[in-house]
Image (spheres, rainbow, N blue to C red):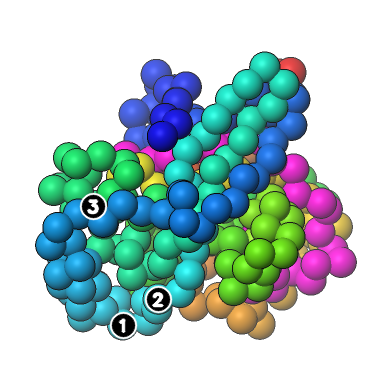
Amino acid sequence: MAAITAASDASDASYELLVTPEELKGGLVVDYNYEAYARKALEGDADDIERAWASKLETHPKTYDGFKFRLHAVVKSDDKVTLQVGLTGYREFVGTQTNPRLRAAGSAHLSNALGCECVLTTSDNKIVLLRRSTDVAFASGLYNGPSGHAEPQYVWNKNISREVLRDGIIREIVEEVGIPEKALSEPRLIGVMRDADQKPDCLFVLETTQTSSEVKEGYRHALEAWESERLAFVDSEDCGLALTPVTRAAFACLARDRAL
């Protein structure tokens, strides 16, 4: 099994960078194998998963299960980076990712559901952030950029790279913020990270042709606006808001990308 290697940001212990902007110069590919890159079960973990899931539903009833991509490993060579990707589910993520016994047994026994996060900038040079609502399962009350997961249900064995590296984050922006796809630039990958719970995310940067006022108006009608309590528009990454680790990682990657 190939190990996930990380380039830690010594200034922020809440995350580590698995892939930096510098390492993306040679390109990145997605290697999908749902059997080889699946989570390894541990005796008794099915009961652990069901208990954790039932507990989460009691406090966050809007939480729902569904297939997700699983980051098995990051493999780096001189000319490219490869993401080894399998399948998992949100129930499996909730039931394994913070389980002390499974974490002690190693990453192979964790869901490692691969998320996506972006730094989204408006045409009047504002960064779009959302304050996560109390209805979401994790990180309520913190600010992040549009985020979520690429969804296997839309592709299965076709165009998996496109879903992981483009369509997933576009869909999240459209559904969470209400910006139409035609008003968005093509996503650009600037890094891959994982947080203290070993939850991995692909990090993107995008621009919209809409102004902050237009974004605010569209947000009122967004399909998944319930996942956040309010919008915030900031001038820079040093905004003073309480940010999720994935958002801090995205801002760190953006700074490194600009310096290239």
Up-down relation of residue 151 to residue 106 (above or below): below
Gap in angstroms between the C-alphas marked 3 and 1? 19 Å
Gap in angstroms between the C-alphas marked 3 and 2? 17 Å
Task: Please name the residue that numbered disc 1 is placed on.
Answer: 61
Residue 148 in magenta? Answer: no
Up-down relation of residue 45 to residue 78 (above or below): below
**Nearest to N terminus: mark 3 or mark 2:** 2
Q: Quadrant of residue 209?
A: bottom right
Residue 174 in magenta? Answer: yes
Task: Please name the residue that numbered disc 2 is placed on.
Answer: 65
Task: Please name the residue that numbered disc 3 is placed on.
Answer: 98
Q: What segment carries the magenta color? A: 169-196
User: Which residue is rendered at x = 23% and y = 52% of the image?
Assistant: 98
The x and y percentages for residue 7 are: 47, 22
Using the rendered image of the protein, determine whether residue 126 is visible from the camera's viewpoint: no
Q: Secondary structure at mark 3?
A: loop
The x and y percentages for residue 120 are: 69, 51
Up-down relation of residue 249 to residue 52 (above or below): above
Left or right: 15 in relation to 206: left
Q: Secondary structure at mark 2?
A: loop
Using the rendered image of the protein, determine whether residue 154 is visible from the camera's viewpoint: yes
User: Which residue is rendered at x = 20% and y = 54% of the image?
Assistant: 42
